[in-house]
């Protein structure tokens, strides 16, 4: 009897685990792709997660939820409630989810939400869009685009260029071999370890950039800008916030402007600089300087001139050399 009871318990446990695993998604579809996959996914709502996987096949997990619970339904059942358009041709895969014309705000609480988990070949180039949800991408070695109206974006280990945009959310981008363009209307932006040029724009939020190589642009209307271990050039602008950080190498230009905040910058020593610096209080060591220098304005050449350094604020400016 004990053996039977033990076997019964084990069977129940296995069934429970299987059901728990299945409950992570509603149904799955697979598509064979070529050597350069082009993936496009657009959802009216929901999250989209894309990760690199081995082989040449795309596994698409449809996660259909209602009242925050994953539904155990088929594709046919989903298409009774929503419009699902799937086009697969060669290396191209396009998936679009839309609400039907009869859907309105009165049944908003009863709507189905479709999220996706995409297991893709590492060489895939993606264009992912959702209206209200988060997007994450990891390990893909191609150009990537993602856009959401209300949600966060998180991309890492990308072997190509990245374009990321959200209207209301934070953006985090790490380890990119190409260029990066990140925009949000209301949220923070964090970018780390980018080998190409990088641009970060937010209307209301802080910007942090670390270990970037190339031309870096950072703009926020209301927030601080922090930069660490940059190589190349920097153009940073904020209307209300502090700007601080260091450059390991300065090759083209350093331009920092804030309407209301302090500027604290460290750059390599012994560079030839064209200085144009304005502030309420200046702490600027000058070496082999020729030009105008007083408590609030410095204009002239240091070490014979060369790289433009433009720092402007109504607050304090501190420039140090390393």
Image (spheres, rainbow, N blue to C red):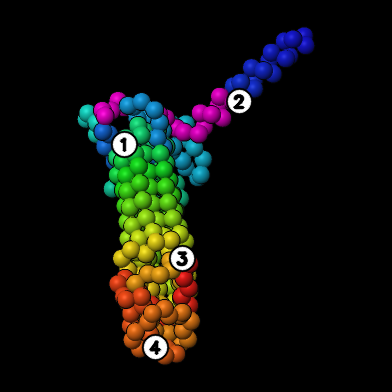
| Category of crowding for the residue at label 1, using alpha-carbon neighbours closer than 10 angstroms: few (below 14), some (14–19), many (at least 20) | many
In the image, taking residue 260 as reference, residue 252 lies left or right, namely left
User: Sequence order check: which comes first, mark 4 or mark 3?
Assistant: 3
Residue stretch in magenta: 17-35
Alpha carbon separation for disc pair 4 and 3 = 23 Å
Residue at 33%, 52% (x, y): give it. 196
Question: Which of labels 1 and 3 is toward the front?
Answer: 3
Residue 157: image location, x then y, percent: 41, 43
Choose mark 4 or mark 1, whichever is in front: 4
Determine the secondary structure under disc 2: helix
Disc number for residue 293? 4
Density class for disc 4 (Cα within 10 Å; few <14, some 14-19, many ≥20) is: some
Going from N to C along the chain, the mark reached first, 1 or 3, is: 1
SS type, badge 4: strand
Q: Which mark is residue 246?
A: 3
Nearer to the camera, 103 or 18 = 18
- Residue 79 appears in which quarter of the rendering? top left
**How many discs mark residues in the rendered view?**
4
Within-10-Å neighbours for mark 2: few <14, some 14–19, many 20+: few
Q: Which residue is mark 2?
A: 16
Mark with earlier residue (4, 1): 1
Residue holding disc 1: 124
Image coordinates for residue 142, horizontal then vertical, percent: 31, 41
């Amino acid at each position: 009897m004990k053996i039977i009871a033990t076997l019964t318990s084990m069977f129940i446990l296995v069934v429970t685990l299987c059901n728990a695993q299945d409950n992570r998604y509603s149904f799955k579809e697979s598509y064979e792709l070529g050597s350069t996959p082009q993936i496009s996914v657009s959802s009216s709502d929901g999250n989209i997660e894309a990760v690199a996987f081995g082989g040449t096949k795309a596994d698409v997990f449809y996660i259909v939820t209602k009242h925050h619970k994953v539904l155990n339904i088929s594709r046919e059942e989903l298409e009774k409630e929503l419009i699902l358009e799937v086009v697969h041709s060669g290396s191209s895969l396009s998936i679009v989810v839309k609400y039907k014309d009869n859907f309105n705000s009165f049944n908003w609480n009863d709507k189905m939400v479709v999220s996706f988990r995409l297991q893709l070949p590492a060489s895939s180039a993606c264009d992912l869009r959702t209206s209200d949800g988060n997007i994450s991408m990891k390990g893909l070695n191609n150009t990537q685009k993602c856009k959401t109206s209300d949600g966060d974006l998180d991309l890492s280990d990308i072997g190509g260029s990245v374009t990321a945009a959200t209207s209301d959310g934070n953006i985090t981008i790490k380890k990119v071999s190409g260029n990066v363009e990140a925009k949000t209307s209301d949220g923070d932006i964090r970018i780390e370890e980018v080998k190409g040029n990088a641009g970060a724009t937010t209307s209301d939020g802080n910007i942090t950039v670390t270990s970037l190589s190339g031309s870096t642009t950072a703009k926020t209307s209301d927030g601080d800008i922090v930069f660490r271990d940059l190589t190349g050039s920097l153009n940073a602008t904020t209307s209300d916030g502090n700007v601080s950080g260091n450059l390991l190498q300065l090759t083209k230009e350093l331009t920092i402007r804030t309407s209301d905040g302090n500027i604290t910058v460290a750059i390599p020593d012994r560079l030839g600089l064209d200085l144009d610096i304005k502030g309420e209080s200046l702490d600027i060591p000058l070496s082999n300087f020729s030009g105008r220098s007083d408590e609030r304005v410095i204009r002239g050449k240091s070490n014979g001139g060369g790289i433009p350094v433009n720092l402007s604020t109504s607050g304090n400016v501190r420039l140090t050399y390393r």
